[in-house]
Image (cartoon, helix red, strand yellow):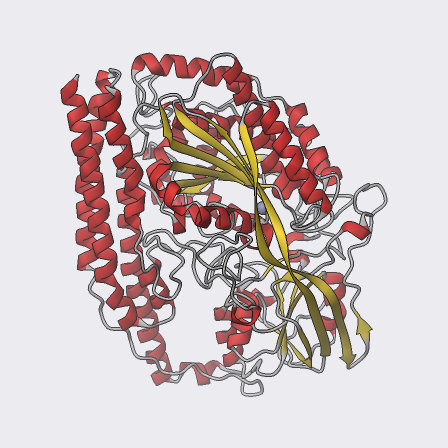
Amino acid sequence: MNRISCLICTFLLFALVRTGPAQSNPQRSSSPGALAGLSQQAAAAEHDWEKKFQDGIVPDNLRESMRRLSARPHHVGSAYDKQNAGWILAQFEKWGFDAHIETFQILFPTPKERVLEMIAPTSFRAKLQEPALAGDPTSNQVSEQLPTYNAYSIDGDVTAPLVYVNFGNREDYEQLERLGVSVKGTIVIARYGEGWRGIKPKVAAEHGAIGCIIYSDPNQDGYFKGLDFPEGGWRPKFGVQRGSVMDTDYPGDPLTPGIGATADAKRLPIKDAKTITRIPVLPISYGDALPLLSALGGPVAGEGWRGNLPITYKIGPGPTKVHLKTTSNWDLKPVNDVIAEMHGSDFPDQWVLRGNHHDAWVNGAEDPVSGMAAVLEEARMLGQLHKLGWNPKRTIIYCAWDGEEPGLLGSVEWVETHMDDLKKHAVAYINSDSNERGFFHASGSHDLEKFINDVIRDIPDPEKNMSVWQRAHLLRISKAKDVEDRTEIRKRIDLHIGALGDGSDYTAFLDHAGIPALNIGFDGEGDGNQYHSVYDDFYWFSRFIDPDFAYERALAQTGGTAVMRLGDSEIIPFEYGGEAETIAKYVSDLEKLLKDKQDEIAERNLELKEGVFTAVADPRKTSIPPVVEAVPLFMNFAPLKNGVESIKASAERYQTAFAKWQAEGCPVPRLLVNQLNQDLMQVQRAFLTEQGLPERPWFKNQIYAPGAYTGYGAKPIAAVREYMDAKRWNDADAQIPMVAGVMQRIAESIQKAATDLDQVIQQH
Ligand SMILES: [Zn+2]
């Protein structure tokens, strides 16, 4: 997953706040010892088991799992990937889980030919190789390493002048237009960062480029950030970020959209697969990029466009001319998901799911093994508790996904295959991925916001004498953007969690199947980044990222406690007040976006009329004024606001009943509570529509979705928002009644749960 977006989640998305009763240092939202969804009697027992669980998590186990799983390259289809799946299966079985491997056949291209050479003004051939480093014992496993490439780049052989496009986002092309630079018929070079890599070739192709190179600038993750590897942890001169550039119309196997990629599934011909890029793409190191960028002519790049290479950044096109060739073996490969169940005692048909992927681009100590090792240590300890007499009320399912890196393949195919059962049985899915020293972060559906806050109030920070919650809360105060923001953070009972995009295996659960989901982890203090490089290995991780495996332990404690609490609660502890306020904020964000765009366009049109652009432009340089644009008309947000009011009203009714039940704290009759829990499980399903998002029908959740032009980044209420971003105002307006209808159904489903809960309360 994308570490940069994780940091953005942590530091920026949390700015969105919901206020609660004023408290200068809120530690706990309910009385001491109480647990949401558990009667007082059950809560005491739960606390005891959770304490045993947390005490039993052993850093050395985490270290040894990581050493084992990252010992050799283990990408999809490799020998060690298969061996890892088998080893994980054996562990689950040893710990008493009912486990099996489920295999899918997916399209996974691997590199056949890769050439990048400069043919003018001088000649240079790119290395396209990460050198083995002395002292790093796995960096020399060359015969098993996947070469540096971008998976799902179309095959291509192109020669053309080069253009530097900064991060290669849509806004960067608007800048190029103003400079009079066209990328039509050229090869573009973009730097990694500011958005998901797959967007770069997509936008380049939309502007007529015929090839795309993506390089890692030291400004993003190299010597600008800290000492580079092996002296420090940051990306060295010839370090390369591999990665998928599969388009985001739908994740999973490109040949079987919407259905499981089982052996006999009906497959699209490769030429009809919509998610393969339109132009060839290749990732390179800054060592390989430097000669190409140094030779560029044309206008000097503006300040926001400059990285940290020791050159004057220029844009081109030319005189740098490059030849780019990349072809792949387009084979079907197996992905091996490991699925391990511990059956529930009271509600076996309600499933709590927990997962992480096990495949990597190369050795993948941080991505994914830092998460996978924690998940395994949780499962080991839950097995141990089970032997001591702990029985979860609900069925717990641990999942070790294969094929996440190429495009969430293992989790998407599994969800698509088991869709009907999941819609009936799934309570929630908790995901993790890369983990490092630092601060807790969570993103997810907001019905789980209060829940995860309560969990982390009970987890000690391993390096500070305070809870993980307290440390994350204080971080937010320190990062607050202004007084108002800071005041809100202090007043708010819970840390706000960000929305999920599609950076890891939660995507199919939340966006396709309407299952409440969380993505959890720690970050911010790992001293380095080798994302998707051969150097993301045990040697590097254990020196620079979490040497004591202390935050590995904290992740296992957090994930396992969350699983136990969801598995043991009598009433599933969803909370809808925060959800309602978050949706209200999404609607007001849309309104604000429209107002900002109206103001911005009106102002620009006025400046065009005044002649501002021509007056301030240097007449000796090319500068083309922007074109006059029609100011967008007002949109009718009233149906969305009414939808929000309905959700707020039903959330309030449910939360009032829930607080009453919680205060009385009596155990509840199983039959009644079962109906309530069944109805609670259907609330997030009401976020879905069968037809999905207007141009991405696989994405069925109408509140939570990744952006078509942000990839990993979230775009809530995407049916409206994406058209607004594309300046298709009428189309955006036309989607509002549909989303408002979804909001009314969400409100009704919460009402239904509130009615059930009233009955539960009357019965005792
Ligand atoms: Zn990952």
Instruction: Give the farthest residue toward the bottom.
Output: 619
Please tell me which residue is depicted at 67% across the width and 43% down the height of the picture: 82
Q: Quadrant of residue 668?
A: top left
Residue appearing at x 45%, y 35% in the figure: 353
Q: Is residue 507 above or below residue 332?
A: above
Q: Residue at x 29, y 70 (%)?
A: 731
Viewer-nearest residue: 686 or 661: 686
Q: Is residue 600 visible?
A: yes
Is 328 positioned to the left or the right of 6 in the image? Answer: right
Q: Is residue 89 above or below residue 235?
A: above
Q: Is residue 455 placed above or below 227 in the rendered structure?
A: above
Q: Position of residue 598 (x, y in %)?
A: 29, 70
Question: How many numbered discs, if any?
Answer: 0
Residue 719 placed where, x, y %?
33, 61
Relative to 128, 742 lies left or right: left
Residue extending furthest toward the right? 134
Residue 54 percent location from the top left of the image: 52, 20
| Foreground of the two, 145 or 586 | 145
In x, y percent, where is residue 10?
48, 43
